[in-house]
Image (tube, grey):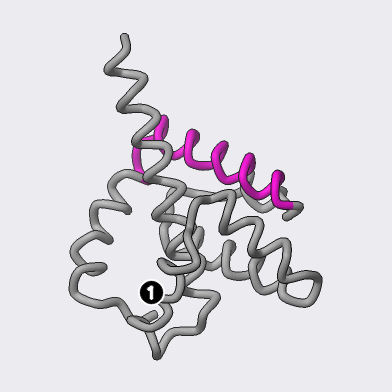
Amino acid sequence: MAIDKEQMQQLPEIKNQLNSKELFEAFKAQLVRDFAQSNFPTDFVASLEPDYDRIHEKIVIEVQRSEGRSDINLMHLLYRVDISEAQLKRYLHESKDEKHFNVIAELIIKRELQKVVIKRYYKDQSS
């Protein structure tokens, strides 16, 4: 997987966040919600470990499986996760050497983790 300089700097932070048990469990729950709402299987999530590369690989597999079924499900998943078409196009353009499934999986991981961190932050602020 080719990673640009900015992404390389973010990767240790993402890996560290995934190592937090509480945060990782919230991340998995968010994945289940968004995948289920988009008619994607969620059974793969239960076996996930806090390993970025394995999570990425599993999401790539699920996204690839959807390709044969319906592009509508994938578009719904991206909408549900909150990845805009413009953002996807930009990342695909910046990562020309990458397979589009790898880019989509990376965006999903980053956005799902971001959603969990933001929810946690605002929950802590209101306490």
Q: Quadrant of residue 90?
A: bottom left
Q: Residue at x 73, y 65 (%)?
A: 72
State the residue lying farthest toward the bottom.
Answer: 97
- Quadrant the N terminus occupies: bottom left
Most frequent secondary structure within the magenta stretch: helix
State the residue lying farthest toward the right.
Answer: 69
Q: Residue 19 lies in magenta, yes or no?
A: yes
Q: Quadrant of residue 76?
A: bottom right
* Mark 1: secondary structure: helix
Q: Residue at x 44, y 49 (%)?
A: 50
Give the image location of residue 35, x and y in percent.
65, 49
Would residue 125 appear left or right of 33 to someone viewing this image? left
Would residue 97 appear left or right of 124 to someone viewing this image? right
Q: Residue at x 25, y 77 (%)?
A: 4
Q: Residues within 10 Å of mark 1 (few under 14, many from 20)?
A: some
Give the image location of residue 109, x and y in percent.
45, 55
Would you place residue 24 above or below residue 98 in this image? above
Would residue 80 appear left or right of 119 to someone viewing this image? right
What stretch of residues is rendered in magenta? 18-38
Give the image location of residue 16, x and y in percent.
28, 47
Q: Which residue is mark 1?
A: 91
65 and 125: which one is in front? 125
